[in-house]
Image (tube, rainbow, N blue to C red):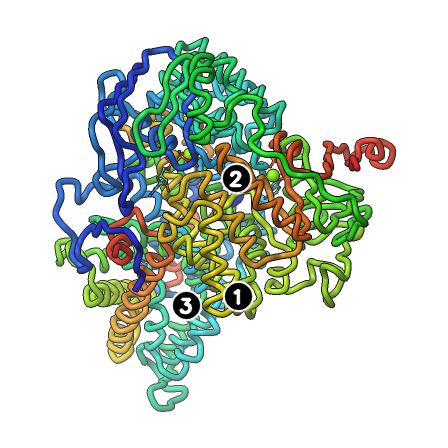
Amino acid sequence: MSIASIRPGLPLARVNPVAKVAATVPLSIVLILTLDVVSASVAILCEILVFTLVGLGGLLWSPRTLPIWIAAPLTGVSMVLYGAPSGAVLWEFGLIHVTEGSVQIGLATTARVIAIALPAVVLFLTIDPTDLADGLAQTLRLPARFVLGALAALRLVGSSIDDWRTLHLARRARGIADRGVVRRSLGQAFAMLVLSIRRGGTLATAMEARGFGAGTERTWARVAHFGRVEWVVIAVGCLVAVVSATVAVTTGSWNVVWS
Amino acid sequence: MSIRARGWGWRHGGRRHPAVRDLDLEIAPGERVLLLGASGAGKSTLLHGLAGVLGGDDDGETLGELLIDGRRPADARGRAGLVLQDPDAQVVMARVGDDVAFGLENLGVARDEIWPRVRAALDSVGLALPLEHATTELSGGQRQRLALAGVLAMRPGLILLDEPTANLDPDGVREVRDAVASVAAATGATLVVVEHRVSTWLPVVDRVIVLGAAGGVLADGPPARVLAERADDLRAAGVWLPDEVPWRAPATSVGPRHPLLEASQLDVGRIAGVAVQRGIDLQVDAGRVLALVGPNGVGKSTLALTLAGLLPPQGGRLAASDLLAQGLRTEPIRWRSRDLLTRIGTVFQSPEHQFVAGSVRAELEVGPRALKLGEGERRARVDELLEALRLGQLAGANPFTLSGGEKRRLSVATAIATRPRLLVLDEPTFGQDATTWRELAKLLVGLRDEGVALVAVTHDEVFVDAIADERFELHPQAFEVSSIATSGARGSARR
Amino acid sequence: MHTSTSPTATSAASGTSSTSSHRFRWRVVDIVVASVIGVAVGVVFWAWGVVWGPISAPIEALLPGLQAAPAAVWVIAGVLGGLVIRKPGAALYTELVAAVVSALIGSQWGGLLTIEAGLVQGLGAELVFAIFLYRNWRFPVALLAGAGAGLAMAINDLVLWYAGAAPLFATVYTISAVIGGALIAGGLAWLAVRGLARAGALDRFAAGRELRTV
Ligand SMILES: Nc1ncnc2c1ncn2[C@@H]1O[C@H](COP(=O)(O)OP(=O)(O)OP(=O)(O)O)[C@@H](O)[C@H]1O
Ligand SMILES: Nc1ncnc2c1ncn2[C@@H]1O[C@H](COP(=O)(O)OP(=O)(O)OP(=O)(O)O)[C@@H](O)[C@H]1O
Ligand SMILES: [Mg+2]
Ligand SMILES: [Mg+2]
């Protein structure tokens, strides 16, 4: 999980996170505009190809992408069962109308979920939160107070694995760690939220004590580069989007959803 | 920077009495002040006020006037650098280098200048770690050095330090003190430092100010004069006079030993497979106080948590005797949480990890409740502890709003409330004034005399000297060169 | 309710806050705590996403559209943030942080779209708080804010993910999102704020002092 980790040693880890997020935008827009199997499938193929080439193939097939492979078909199935009916009726039962049209929609939805989620999950795993904050504040010029506040909070909660362990030890020492796994975890999660919020109060004081939010123009110790590599990453993102759209249009399967 | 207070005071929201009141004070630029006073007298509150971080009307009520360089502190934020009392709570960033750079960024220092200053600040406090090192993986003492480096790097006009050496080993204390002194000398900054152990800072300060527990200033002037002329007043107010030991424990009777816990060739570590100390041989006896000492980061807390049955041993054996196990299995790590309560009580290095309730009283009742004690018994135990550790007035307060010393006493009290046979205490006496130190020591020795075994991790030489029956020293180990090198560098018990 | 020995009632134990000049300025502690809540809930969002398949599949199969009710878990951050911080933008900001965090850990709805959904849902809650001029934080308003966030979620989902769904499905989906939002996001958030206040976590906020003082 990238939430707590310090710059993961993965390919693309040094690329400005803003570029990585931006690279997923064109494809997301294309895939939201249309609902067809072709564009989404082409996109998936391109993604697999690109990620394998840059050396992120390992992540692609790791357990971290498992939720996608589960969620996508499930969303698709519900569209098969309840999508707007059209064409020949294949099966009918109560509210359920499985038609040729709804099967089409179901397949397209499945592919679309995969195509949208895959790059996000894989790319985001290569993002270090500190780099992201630098990118948001320096490249996108979002308000530094909020970006850094969020980063500090991420560290407070995100060092969770460690804190979670200590908190577990502390609760064991206090005699309140004997309940069942579920109750214990829930109780501990709440305790952790409480601890994080209380510490957030102290941390805010500590940040103010070091001149945070005092109104001086802030400088940045780390440079958020936005150079050739970043543009290349974005260009690759655009390219995938264009290829998917073009193939879909030329094969005649382009299908704008709201028409 | 100069400081001027006129009848200044502050009442925290939700508290009846002001934490500080009727304060009249002038501090000239470049003065170096040691600020003393009983635990809870309002020293930290004053430092927060000077740094301009007490907050607004939402957070409490200001009385009188406090100015630094003629301005309201809140308007001059960043010019005063404050190291908070709790080193745990002030780590902002995930990497050591970034964390030190944070303050410099806020001040608008140019990037080229930031990194040399970061490196220099880290070196000056003796934190020789790569800039990329994760801040979560620091020991308590290392965190304190980090916090200090973050402030020194800012080269503030007013340096405010709240017990900056409470968690440091004796070498570290000297190192940090000298680092602060040389930064102050080089920049001409005004220095205000709070510390209970007067002797540490005497060589570098030129003025002592003592806050009265009931408000106002109790004593003020050059260190030598104040300490000589007002010794009795100061002692009565809980000030820790140099080279005085508040109280000494009577020796234990040298009867037969009753071992409770035995470690043989024990390896300890926080993460499975990563040991920080190996091959520890150690015995914990009923009715004795064992002090665990050693430099910062050597693994004392890790060993303590292992002895307490909270961390699994990474190797070797840790066995409880029948006297402690009382019918349970010999390995404490396999006991249930509730079974630990009456057997081993633990006080963590950072008190806040242990707090689980919304008020001091509720906090003390957590253990007795888990033991399913009756209402009357619970009340009696809690009242007794509140009384003994001077927390009675604070029974309704939120544990997180207590002063540093009060938090520490509360965390010790929570462990004692369930009457365990073995108490494992991580830095039990840090942040205590002489009076509360004495009361805490008496309480612990009282337990010892009832047959409770105590294991105390500590940097407090006075505690080791006046209270401990045995001393066990941990040394840094070099693992790469295994058998030969470590056999000489192993912990040794002086019995 | 919790009673403490403190005599300083900050305000009568009502759900309305007093006017003061800085009422709408964000303090640093507001930002940090709103972010902490956002991050924590973001982790919950992510976890809910992982178990979402098995939870939603049976509902989708048997009672299509009703999955919007459990999906309303994803709008809780905004209501929670709004109720704790009580400043304009708090609901929007908190929900946004939660969305970003869940996307960072990895979400099957992609990065951009997860964040976009967070914005829309946060806006839903924010609008309700704004309608009450950021003065009323009582239970009914919490329910309404939850409902608002649920409605926003429904609209967003129907446009982006269930485009091409039949009208009946869309109606069921919207209604369950609103009810689910009110009960899960509104009700749970309100309870959570009380729990946090009791545990003493909100002492620096009006939300905490109201419940704790005297
Ligand atoms: N945030 C807070 N909210 C409410 N009360 C507080 C808060 N911080 C401190 N207090 C109370 O104000 C009083 C003074 O606390 P302060 O921390 O200034 O003491 P101190 O002199 O630094 O003590 P110590 O030596 O133990 O650190 C204490 O009674 C404490 O409980
Ligand atoms: N939560 C943690 N996760 C990983 N490593 C840790 C953690 N806490 C401490 N360490 C590392 O383990 C080693 C031993 O730490 P430990 O806290 O036991 O030291 P210590 O002797 O108690 O030091 P101190 O006197 O500074 O408290 C240190 O090198 C530290 O960097
Ligand atoms: Mg203090
Ligand atoms: Mg330690």
Q: Horizontal placement of B21 versus B388: left or right?
A: left
Q: Is residue C60 left or right of residue B270?
A: left
Figure quarter occupied by ligand 3:
top left
Q: Measured from the top left, where is residue B427 in percent x and y?
A: 58, 39
Determine whether the residue tagged by mark 1 lies in a helix, strand or loop. helix
Q: Same chain for the residues at labels 1 and 2, yes or no?
A: no
Q: Which mark is residue B370?
A: 1
Is label 2 in a helix, a strand or a loop?
loop
- B424 or B190, which is in the foreground? B424
Residue drawn at (39%, 60%), measured in percent from left and top? A248
Camera-side mark, 1 or 3: 1
Circle 2 sits on which residue? A13
Answer with the quarter of the image where residue A113 lies: bottom left
Q: Residues within 10 Å of mark 1 (few under 14, many from 20)?
A: some
Type of amino acid under label 3:
Ala
Position of the C terminus of chain B, as image quadrant, is top right
